[in-house]
Amino acid sequence: MYTLTGVSKTFRARGSTVTAVRDLNLSIADGEWLAIQGRTGSGKSTLLQLLGGMDRPSTGTVNLDGQDLATMSEKQLTEIRAARVGFVFQMFNLIPTLSAIENVEAALVPLRTPAVQRRERAAAALAAVGLADRAGHLPSELSGGQQQRVGIARALVKEPSVLLADEPTGNLDVDTRDEILTLLEQIWTANQLTLVLVTHDSAVAALAERVAVMHDGKLDITGTRIG
Ligand SMILES: Nc1ncnc2c1ncn2[C@@H]1O[C@H](COP(=O)(O)OP(=O)(O)OP(=O)(O)O)[C@@H](O)[C@H]1O
């Protein structure tokens, strides 16, 4: 489980200082589905980066199962990201020159999984997202929804305990959005994942167990949905 205490994140760029996250306190239970809403620039992506150990807070602690990500070395953070946290992105972030199955396998390279097992696990992950018949296709040969399925398979293949999704349906039409949400819901239920999903879309947030709203770096956990 996550416990964030007094977390702030300040960026200094081009002579000015921006506080993206301000004095934030938040607990996320194991297996919870939390949606984070908020206007553009309110700090949602920054919060997700802090949860995933992709960045460290300027002040405060980001505790994941008793370990503070804020004080970990880069090597320790890399290990946490590789083994425990899956990421799903709005723009899919697939490697264009690799096939679907190679993109999924790539997630297992940092874990030093032997090549034969990598291939088997990647094939199983692609099958789990309904893409067994597209394993050899390049991203450019897949629809947006199919590319996001590959992105989800890549996040899941390492069997993470946490899935962090930043606007995972933001680049998809409404029907495809609903297919991807159904898939995420199935995966969340089947794998008992902790799912934190950033979205502008109230229809997406409505599926979550709890909704937190960010305003100018502050988090309001009233369960209120906006949009
Ligand atoms: N690396 C950075 N350097 C400087 N400022 C940054 C950096 N990353 C984010 N910011 C600033 O922090 C604030 C919060 O940004 P963030 O991307 O977290 O917002 P967001 O709510 O995710 O926005 P969006 O919905 O548009 O993605 C913004 O004012 C942004 O300009």
Image: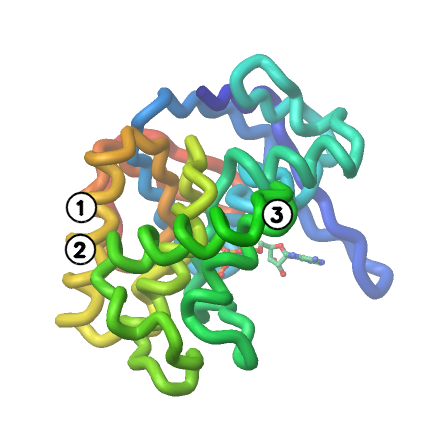
Residue at 16% x, 53% y: name it. 182
Residue at 60% x, 26% y: name it. 62
Q: Earlier in the sequence, mark 3 or mark 1?
A: 3
Q: Which mark is residue 135?
A: none
Q: Where is residue 162 in the image (x, y as percent from the top left)?
A: 43, 35
Which corner quadrant of the figure contains ligand 1? Answer: bottom right
Q: What residue type is labelled 1?
A: Ala
Farthest residue to the top: give it: 66
Q: How many marks?
A: 3
Q: Mark 3 = which residue?
A: 20
Q: Residue 206 carries which label?
A: 1
Q: Mark 2 = which residue?
A: 203
Q: How far apart are marks 3 and 1 (CA)?
A: 25 Å
- Secondary structure under tag 1 reads loop
Residue at 25% x, 43% y: name it. 187
> Disc 2 vs disc 1: Cβ atoms closer than 8 Å?
yes
